[in-house]
Image: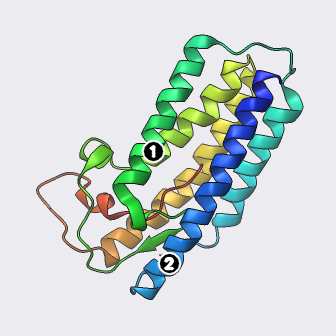
Amino acid sequence: MPAVYLIVGFLVVQRLAELGFARRNHRALLARGGVEVGQAHYPAMVALHAGWLLALAATIDPRTAPSLPLLAVFVLLQYGRAWVLATLGSRWTTRIVVLPGAAPVRSGPYRYLRHPNYVIVCGEMAVVPLMFGAWVLAVAASVLNLVVLRARLQVENRALERLGGGQDRTRPNAAAHRVTDRERG
């Protein structure tokens, strides 16, 4: 089977498994008093990710061999994704859900980055197409992702400021570590 189809297949299975995990966590967070915000941009985010996966399968010549250095970067991004999921556990969803007053997550990748999952998704949107020489798709997907992500981050950060708890005012960006929602992307 061509490498591009193996990678797209892996991503589809991964995303579907994450959606199941996210749905379960979403229901549990709401039952615990979580507040969901940002529903308006969610369909655009889903459409972007689905379109990206379809574009990968439809536009990349299946005979194209992947760049091995970029494949290695992709593998590292997957380890980063697993680290985010393991760190957030039951607080991870694909939607923005804030538990009012909840202490921020400050372990794992949240020690180093405010929004590590978004960094990983940005990396994937660029690295996967570039791995197969599809630089136009990499640029287009990255630009569209940044547009959606900008709207999402504004909503998410406002919700964290308004609803989050346990804020450490001495640490820059500490409020964002309460985020219970991570995109997939």
Q: Nearer the viewer, residue 16 or 134?
A: 16
Task: Write down the quadrant of residue 82 in the picture.
Answer: top left
Residue 169, numbered circle = none
Can you give x and y, in whole percent of width and height, for residue 76 in the image?
47, 28
Residue at the (15%, 53%) spot, across then down: 171
In the picture shown, does residue 102 fall above or below 69?
below
Left or right, 94 with respect to 56, comes to left
> Looking at the image, is mark 1 or mark 2 earlier in the sequence?
2
Q: Are marks 1 and 2 in contact (CB under 8 Å)?
A: no
Q: Nearer the viewer, residue 34 or 140?
A: 34
Residue at the (32%, 80%) spot, across then down: 100
Can you give x and y, in whole percent of width and height, for residue 64 in the image?
81, 14
Residue at the (83%, 34%) spot, across then down: 57
Left or right, 126 with respect to 77, comes to right
Q: Which residue is mark 2?
A: 36
Can you give x and y, in whole percent of width and height, for residue 152 in the image?
53, 60
**Kind of residue at disc 2:** Glu
Q: Residues within 10 Å of mark 2 (few under 14, many from 20)?
A: some
Residue 82, numbered circle = 1
Residue at the (33%, 49%) spot, across then down: 114
Rounded to the nearest angstrom, the CA distance separating label 1 from label 2 is 24 Å
Can you give x and y, in whole percent of width and height, for residue 157 in the image?
39, 63
Q: Nearer the viewer, mark 1 or mark 2?
A: 1
